[in-house]
Image (cartoon, rainbow, N blue to C red):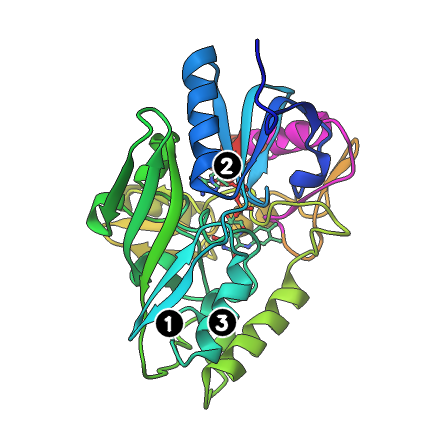
Amino acid sequence: MKLQKKIITNKNLREFNSLQIAVKAKYYIECKTDHDLEVAFQFIKKNKIKFLILGEGTNVVFTKHFEGLIIKNIFKNEKKIYKNNVKVSSGYNWDRFVSFCIKNSLYGLENLSGIPGTVGAGPIQNIGAYGEEISDYIEHIEVYNLKTGNLETLNNKNCNFDYRNSFFKKNKHLFIKNIFFKLKDKFIANNSYQDLQVYEFKNALQLRKKVLKIRSRKLENYLSKPNVGSFFKNPLIKRQDLKRLLSQDANLKFYNHNSLIKVSAAWLIERSNLKGLKFDNARVSTKHSLVLINEDKSPNSILKLKNKIKTVVLNKYDIRLEEEPTII
Ligand SMILES: Cc1cc2nc3c(=O)[nH]c(=O)nc-3n(C[C@H](O)[C@H](O)[C@H](O)COP(=O)(O)OP(=O)(O)OC[C@H]3O[C@@H](n4cnc5c(N)ncnc54)[C@H](O)[C@@H]3O)c2cc1C
């Protein structure tokens, strides 16, 4: 196989995933221009190999060496404001982008301050926090189709955004290149979320600072305690199943979610006495029961721990927890 200069072989991915799992990628390319994407596309087409787009690796769990091409996104050529709209390249850091918007008097994203990762990964699982989701501010998205080599545009509706879900989860060949955000020119604080209700915010920067403070108190720093944020989604159950759960425990923590009920996964894990549980070199955070901390170079410990949690919760509540990060 003839390799382009830009493609590296046997790249260790340890520093490219926040769980610090030391797997290797057979092939690896950093994409910062259209030409780099074209090189990746031609390589995949010619060699018929699998591929994976990677941002900052804060929401992926590598379970083994990757026998294909890792396409690392470092696209950072555009950040332009048109009235209330911003066009931004996907390789920018998300939190820096939130700060940029606030500095330019464009509002809406402040509750999403402090979420790690790239702008381009935001739509994949429709990132959300403190009562906001990225999907409420996306106008349209430009993607590079790695199956055809074409550029395509998806409007907000085409993206099928839902709770920690989108069209992109099942269409992994679409490389998000640019996102067009539609933001607000007036700041209206969204303090509907429980932790924020007791505060009044005069401006977006105050709200951002409070969110960052709460996050640093409640969450583990992934640089010192390798993790991917919440490991499990809050399960969505049917209304008729709620009765059964409430009869089992009247203190069940749940919320309405359209016609369904969203149950707190953190609550299920805590009530199963799993908070703080250690398994080999992985443990459930004592600060936040949805956060699993990894201290292993191999994926074994974290996988055993998450499987243990799933089994205990299933046996106790008859609820199947679903992983939030992409398992590879
Ligand atoms: C400490 C911590 C706290 C967190 N808190 C939150 C939170 O509050 N809310 C929340 O929603 N998430 C949270 N997360 C999860 C994570 O920050 C987000 O999912 C983030 O968007 C991941 O960005 P990334 O660049 O690291 O993506 P990666 O982990 O690199 O990739 C994630 C997925 O997106 C795909 N992908 C990445 N970039 C692109 C692209 N350009 N085009 C197409 N596909 C792409 C990848 O193939 C992969 O499937 C947290 C994570 C950590 C470690």
Q: Which residue is drawn at 71% across and 32% down?
A: 21
Range shown magenta = 289-311
Up-down relation of residue 280 to residue 44 (above or below): below
Residue behind mark 3: 100
Q: Residue 310, located in which quarter of the rendered image?
A: top right
- Place of residue 89 in the rendered image (x, y in percent of width and height, measured from the top left): 43, 53
Up-down relation of residue 225 to residue 218 (above or below): above
Q: Residues under labels 1 and 2: Cα distance?
A: 28 Å
- Name the N-terminal-most of marks 3 and 2: 3
Q: Quadrant of the N terminus?
A: top right
**Viewer-nearest of discs 3 and 2:** 3
Residue behind mark 1: 108
Which residue lies most toward the top here?
A: 1
- Place of residue 235 in the rendered image (x, y in percent of width and height, measured from the top left): 41, 43
Q: Residue 250, located in which quarter of the rendered image?
A: bottom left
Q: What residue type is labelled 3?
A: Phe
Which residue lies most toward the bottom here?
A: 202
- Going by the image, does 103 lie left or right of 173? right
Q: Which mark is residue 323?
A: 2
Residue 297 is a magenta residue = yes
Q: What residue type is labelled 1?
A: Gly
Q: Which residue is drawn at 77% across and 52% down?
A: 224
Q: What residue type is labelled 2?
A: Glu
